[in-house]
């Protein structure tokens, strides 16, 4: 058996995988790190409806809802909380908030929607209830990073904009789990924000997302995927987003902040729920995301194999080239998204992704959960 030929095939495969990775970093991800929004000739403020869906979220509402209610925004706006069949004290808490904040509107749902699992029905009700054309979505466990969140997000709109993608960060805490949660969140964000900048928007995050009611109704809301519990953010944006109608906002005053998972089991459940929608993505999005994930997954095994079986010098040169490109791309992107403290760890997080893919691969074929809480 001619092992030399097999080792050459191994090496060339490693080169191909590395080139694929470099393509994603230099063609897509580079866009976010060096992104500069266009300066508008004139600014125009729009009426905004903030929508928050909550089920048994009294504790989170008590802690986070004031952040949306005290926004510094002079133009007309409202904050709509859709109380989705809560059994806790949410109703009484919201009634107390209404006495103090006139802009707060509560929609109380007392019946489950048949055949529409998850958050989509209450969110649809919230959007239909909204008085204003521009809706700004977040979750009960999120708080705006500043009092200018509404102002910053709506300022992204122009006459052609229908969708604005924001960044939903997590609070920084001690421990490796917190760093991994924030790395995975950043890793996802650099993809969906960069793809949007490249004219291929495929998702947003419901923690910080805005769009016009017009585009929501034009696509008949979530009707195309009502049977899927999740997907109110990624599947909708994948269907409605285009090269011309989607923008991003990565100003640090336009972020939202959430409490990260405090246990490994809790984080695993969150990820499993989120990734069950990937099978419903458009073919072009599946191809792009799959190409990146597969090349990312194969890189380290092929690196080790080339290192041991072919040429350790060539393996290290190729490895260092990729590492250099990663650093040049990730550092400005992390700085832009307020995650620069993760940069010294990025090699270890990148290596961790090999195991991450192994852990969550089965989620892509698993039947989606039917509850959103």
Image (cartoon, rainbow, N blue to C red):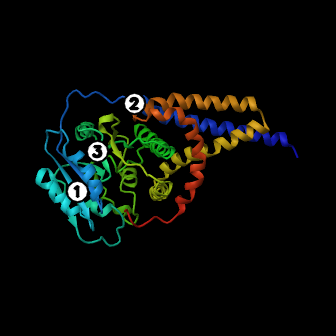
Say whether residue 106 is left or right of residue 220.
left
In the rendering, which numbered label is found on residue 35?
Answer: 2
Q: Nearer the viewer, residue 9 or 124?
A: 124
At label 3, counting other C-alpha atoms closer than 10 Å, the crowd grade (few under 14, some 14-19, many 20 or more) is many
Q: Is residue 130 above or below residue 16?
A: below
Q: Residue at x 33, y 60 (%)?
A: 222
Q: Nearer the viewer, mark 1 or mark 2?
A: 1
Of labels 3 and 2, the one closer to you:
2
Residue at x 65%, y 38% (from the top left corner): 16
Element type where label 2 sits in the image: loop
Cα distance in 3D space between marks 1 and 2 = 34 Å
The kind of secondary structure element at disc 1 is strand
The answer for how far apart the CA atoms under marks 3 and 2 are is: 20 Å
SS assignment at label 3: loop
Which residue is depicted at the point 59% across and 38% down?
A: 20
| Residue beneath disc 3 | 162
Coordinates of residue 2 in the picture (x, y in percent): 87, 43
Quarter where residue 161 is shown: top left
- Of 9 and 350, nearer the camera is 350
Of circles 1 and 3, the one toward us is 1
- The answer to which of 326 and 270 lies nearer the viewer is 270
Residue occupying image coordinates x 60% and y 41%: 351
Q: Which residue is mark 1?
A: 81
Upstream in sequence: badge 1 or badge 3:
1
Residue 177: x and y in percent read: 49, 47
Which quadrant is home to the C terminus? bottom left
As measured in the structure, the alpha-carbon distance from the residue carrying label 1 to the one carrying label 3 is 23 Å
On the image, the x and y values in percent for residue 25 come to 53, 35
Quarter assignment of residue 298: top right
| First of labels 3, 2 by sequence position | 2
């Amino acid at each position: 058996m001619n092992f030399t030929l097999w080792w050459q095939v191994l090496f060339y495969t490693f080169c191909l995988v590395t080139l694929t990775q470099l393509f994603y970093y230099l063609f897509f991800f580079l866009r976010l790190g060096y992104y500069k929004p266009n300066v508008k000739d004139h600014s125009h403020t729009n009426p905004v409806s903030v929508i928050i869906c909550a089920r048994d979220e009294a504790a989170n509402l008590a802690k986070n809802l004031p952040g949306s209610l005290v926004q510094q925004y002079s133009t007309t706006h409202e904050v709509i909380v859709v109380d989705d069949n809560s059994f806790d004290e949410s109703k009484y808490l919201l009634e107390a908030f209404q006495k103090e904040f006139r802009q707060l509107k509560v929609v109380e749902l007392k019946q489950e929607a048949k055949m529409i699992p998850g958050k989509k029905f209450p969110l649809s009700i919230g959007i239909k209830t909204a008085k204003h054309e521009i809706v700004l979505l977040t979750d009960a466990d999120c708080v705006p990073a500043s009092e200018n969140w509404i102002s910053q997000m709506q300022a992204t709109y122009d006459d052609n904009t229908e969708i604005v993608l924001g960044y939903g960060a997590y609070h920084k805490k001690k421990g490796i789990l917190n760093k991994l949660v924030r790395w995975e969140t950043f890793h996802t964000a650099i993809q969906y924000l960069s793809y949007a900048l490249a004219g291929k928007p495929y998702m947003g995050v419901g923690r910080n997302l805005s769009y016009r009611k017009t585009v929501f109704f034009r696509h008949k809301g979530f009707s195309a995927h009502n049977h899927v519990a999740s997907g109110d953010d990624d599947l909708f944006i994948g269907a409605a987003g285009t090269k011309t109608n989607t923008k991003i906002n990565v100003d640090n005053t336009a972020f939202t902040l959430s409490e990260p998972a405090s246990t490994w089991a809790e984080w695993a459940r969150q990820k499993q729920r989120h990734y069950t929608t990937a099978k419903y993505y458009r073919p072009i999005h599946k191809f792009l995301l799959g190409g990146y994930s597969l090349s990312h997954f194969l890189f380290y095994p092929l690196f080790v194999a080339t290192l041991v079986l072919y040429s350790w010098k060539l393996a290290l040169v190729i490895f260092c080239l990729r590492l250099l490109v990663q650093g040049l791309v990730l550092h400005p992107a992390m700085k832009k998204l307020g995650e620069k403290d993760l940069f010294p760890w990025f090699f270890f997080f990148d290596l961790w992704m090999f195991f991450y893919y192994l852990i969550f691969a089965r989620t892509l074929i698993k039947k989606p959960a039917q509850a959103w809480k």
